[in-house]
Amino acid sequence: MTSATTTMNAALPAEHRERLMRVAREVSFAAGARLFEEGRRADRFWIVRTGSVALDLRVPGRRPAVVETVGHGELIGWSWHFPPYLWHLGAEATSPVRAWEFDAETVREMCAADSGFGRAIAVWVGRVVAQRLPASRARLLDLYAPYGSGGLA
């Protein structure tokens, strides 16, 4: 589910986008490739250029539950921004994916060195988290609660 306010282009001013893109590298993932696993070290993040990625949560005794699918222009991974820098979810390419990849430590250093840039990144990542957590909750209720999400607000 794309949100116009959480894509990189909408969330970051041009000067911050340009600065961030200076440390990007192009990567590709085949359909079915795992980008990361829940509980492992979050040392990078991605912006999707083409394709889609399912964010999933391990459920004991079941297949991972897909809580959201993200696509063009969206951030994959926010755990890199918050200690202890461990993934809270897993991620799998649901189609061939082309993305920009960023080294988390490099970007955190850039944020520490420039408070304006750091604030812009923090607000962007915060918006992504604020959008995805309620969406994940609703999806998990739909999958596992006796009466689904029941239209809870």
Image (tube, helix red, strand yellow):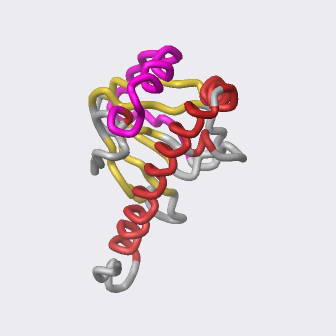
User: Considering depth in this image, is 50 or 114 the residue closer to the camera?
Assistant: 114
Membership of 21 in magenta stretch: yes
User: Considering depth in this image, is 95 or 19 the residue closer to the camera?
Assistant: 19
* Residue found at the far right of this picture: 84
The residue positioned 27% from the left and 32% from the top of the image is: 51
Residue 94 on image: x %, y %: 31, 39
User: Considering depth in this image, is 111 or 74 the residue closer to the camera?
Assistant: 111
The residue positioned 37% from the left and 62% from the top of the image is: 135
Q: Residue 86 vs residue 32: left or right?
A: right
Relative to 133, does residue 54 appear above or below in the rendering?
Answer: above
Relative to 96, does residue 54 appear above or below in the rendering?
Answer: below
Magenta stretch?
A: 9-37
* Residue found at the far front of this picture: 116
Membership of 26 in magenta stretch: yes
Q: Which quadrant of the view contains residue 149?
A: bottom left
Q: Which quadrant of the view contains residue 112?
A: top right
Residue 148 on image: x %, y %: 32, 79
Residue 44 on image: x %, y %: 57, 30
The residue positioned 37% from the left and 70% from the top of the image is: 138
Q: Residue 149 vs residue 25: left or right?
A: left
Q: Quadrant of the C terminus?
A: bottom left
Residue 99 on image: x %, y %: 38, 25
Relative to 119, does residue 134 appear above or below in the rendering?
Answer: below
Relative to 149, does residue 112 appear above or below in the rendering?
Answer: above
Q: How many marks?
A: 0
The residue positioned 65% from the left and 46% from the top of the image is: 82
